[in-house]
Amino acid sequence: MLLIVLDQVSKIYPGNVQALKDVDLKVDKGEFVFVVGQSGSGKTTLFKLLLKELEPTSGNIYINNKNLEQLRHSQVPRFRRGVGVVFQDFRLLKDRNVYENIAFAQRIVGVPAHRIRKNVMTILELVGLREKYRSYPSQLSGGEQQRVAMARALVNNPPLLLADEPTGNLDPKNAWEIMRLLEAVNKRGTTVLVVTHNRNIVERMQKRVVTLSEGQIVADHRKGGYIYV
Amino acid sequence: MYSWANGLKQGFKNLFRNRLFTLASIGTITACLFLLGMFYCIVVNFQGIYSEVETTVGVTVFFDSGVKEDQINQIKAQIQARDDVDKVNYTSAEEAWAQYKEKVFPNNKDNILTNLDSDNPLADSASLEVYLKDASSQDQVIDYIKSIDGVRSVNASESAAKNLSSIGKLLGYASAGIIIILLGVAIFLISNTVRIGIAVRHEEIAIMKYLGATDFFVRAPFLVEGMLIGLIGSVIPLCVLRYLYARVVTFVTSQFSLLSALISFTPVGEVFRLLVPITLLIGLGMGFLGSWFTLIRRVRV
């Protein structure tokens, strides 16, 4: 069953800069997909299009059978609640502790207060940080911060998780731990799409790899390694 | 529910995050609303004096020689019948003469002018004093009276009424002009304060968007911030004005007894009954508008 469909999607930025050109991509529910490519290949544009942060110049994007173009502005927040997002730089609120960072995501979607504590502690258990719920981001290692970011992205149980270079700021050991965590999340049924440069990780994980070059998909391997373009 | 609670909490925090801009905005609104309040106090008191003067501004009507008292009474009834006339007093020629004597030689029983009583020099000076409900209708009343048969002349303290009216208008226009300019400056400053708040919290706003926050959730703290600035900026001048008004009234009535005999100040309660809600509403309104204009342009999920 398809979760993501890109149908002839192109994106041209002002100044006639072509970021994506006639991209066709289908991702099934429950899949784990790497999107790889050099800088400027269109990975970030694809990421932003999937979050409806950008609009395609032409073509259609469907997520869960919904055409993103037809979403009204007032429907965008609800759509985004179904997409967990993890960034390279973690993007945690530095003035709030681990618990508050995650509870914040629940409050935004209006989860009742009495359920927040239970949900936050459950998700912290999953990412292995239950004991550190009172710590502030500055007191955590990079790997731990990324796990908090993942907990925040997952606490509302989104069917899709998008990760933009989630291992970019981490050493190989922490990077691998994060990938194992993403794999565990994927095994629970969440569709995971990871944009990355990390060749070692991609080769080791043996998942589907979509390669972008100059805004086009040049390779799509079901269970492949990193393709050099 | 959480959106409101979060908006209030973050709104309070925002006030302290950009202290300098918050103070500048509060200062400008305070200055603006202080001037507004000051002009309001002046205008209210001016209106009080004006209404008092209105009732004392009269029109005096004199008659052709030979017009009898009966005819004068008929004219009196005719004038009295008008809606814009408050009351009409009749002064006979004898009363006019007696008043004149008293004016020239007050409290003098052996008034030298008494010798002229048998041949009243003011025989043709019977008059009607017409008091108006509203000084602005004076011209129409005068034209009407002049058109009545038997009326010789009409005297009116025209300039007093007109001057009062035009001073009132001038004061109103000047204060409206100054207040509008200051309101504009205040809204601009609030808008700037909120804009800086948005820049400072740029990262947090971006995270909120990704997590599925609605426009309202993101904007509420900034709206609260703007409205709090407006509220504080309106409470300060109200307190200052309340204190100063009482002091000024006490000072004037004790130091200038002659002036206090001529004019009566509007009571504090009466002035502030309307001034308090007006000032608070304007303060909150400015805060809301200042932040709203910035938010609709700069914060959209």
Image (cartoon, coloured by chain):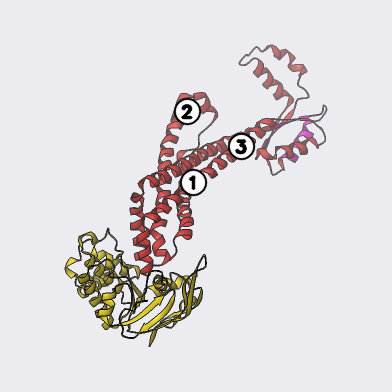
Chain colours: A yellow, B red
Residue corresponding to mark 3: B170
Residue corresponding to mark 1: B274
Q: Residue at x 31, y 64 (%)?
A: A91
What chain does mark 1 sit on?
Answer: B
- Magenta stretch in the rendered image: B59-79
- Neighbor class of circle 1 (other Cα within 10 Å; few <14, some 14-19, many 20+) is few
What chain does mark 2 sit on?
Answer: B
Mark carried by residue B168: none
Quarter of the figure with residue A194: bottom left
Q: Is residue B198 above or below residue A21?
A: above
Q: Is residue B67 above or below residue A23?
A: above
Q: Is residue B184 visible?
A: yes
Task: Please check the rendered image and state whether residue B209 is part of the magenta-colored stretch, yes or no.
Answer: no
- Foreground residue, A87 or B102? A87
Find residue A122 and report its horizontal and vertical position in percent. 22, 74
- Are the residues at dot 3 and dot 2 in contact (C-beta closer than 8 Å)? no
Q: Is residue B64 above or below residue B178?
A: above
Q: Residue at x 47, y 28 (%)?
A: B253
